[in-house]
Image: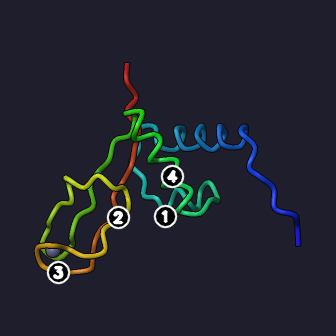
Amino acid sequence: MKKKETIPRERNLTIRQELMHLLAGQCLSVSLLSREIRLSEKEIYSHLEQMQRTGILNITPARCTGCGYLFAKRNRLKKPGKCPQCKGTHIEQPLFSIATGR
Ligand SMILES: [Zn+2]
């Protein structure tokens, strides 16, 4: 088994750049980002959370497919497990994009 290495700073920067590139002008889900960048969803979320703190992240909130409830006020990025309105569990994933300010 390979020795576990700490992730170098450059790799982090590259991931951020990849994320920025992928999210510029389109809304993507974390599962898709995870496949594109080949990182676990957990890691993608941690990058997105940092981007959210810097204010460049646009979030299309998760939505319940059962009743249409929007999880708009949710601060956490992860997909909610259950709808508070109809208790349904068919929730659309939130989508992310970045603000390309000019
Ligand atoms: Zn619902």
> Dot 1 lies on which element?
helix
Q: Quadrant of residue 26?
A: top left
The answer for how far apart the CA atoms under marks 4 and 1 are is: 13 Å
Q: Is mark 3 within 8 Å of ligand 1?
A: yes
Q: Quadrant of residue 37?
A: bottom right
Q: Position of residue 79 (x, y in %)?
A: 35, 65
Residue marked by disc 2: 93
Amino acid residing under circle 4: Ser
State which quarter of the image contains the C terminus. top left
Residue marked by disc 4: 46
Residue marked by disc 1: 31
Q: Position of residue 72 (x, y in %)?
A: 20, 54
Q: Is there CB contact under 8 Å for labels 2 and 1?
A: yes
Which one is closest to the eye, mark 4 or mark 2? 4
The answer for how far apart the CA atoms under marks 3 and 2 are is: 16 Å
Front residue of 49 and 102: 49
- Nearer-N-terminus badge (4/1): 1
Residue marked by disc 3: 87
- Nearer-N-terminus badge (2/1): 1
Q: Is mark 1 within 8 Å of ligand 1?
A: no
Q: Position of residue 36 (x, y in %)?
A: 59, 56
**Given the current orientation, which residue lies at the most extreme top position?**
102
- Nearer-N-terminus badge (3/2): 3
Looking at the image, which residue is at 30% across and 68% down?
80
Looking at the image, which residue is at 33% across and 56% down?
76
The answer for how far apart the CA atoms under marks 4 and 3 are is: 28 Å
Q: Is there CB contact under 8 Å for labels 3 and 2?
A: no
Looking at the image, which residue is at 25% across and 55% down?
74
State which quarter of the image contains the N terminus. bottom right
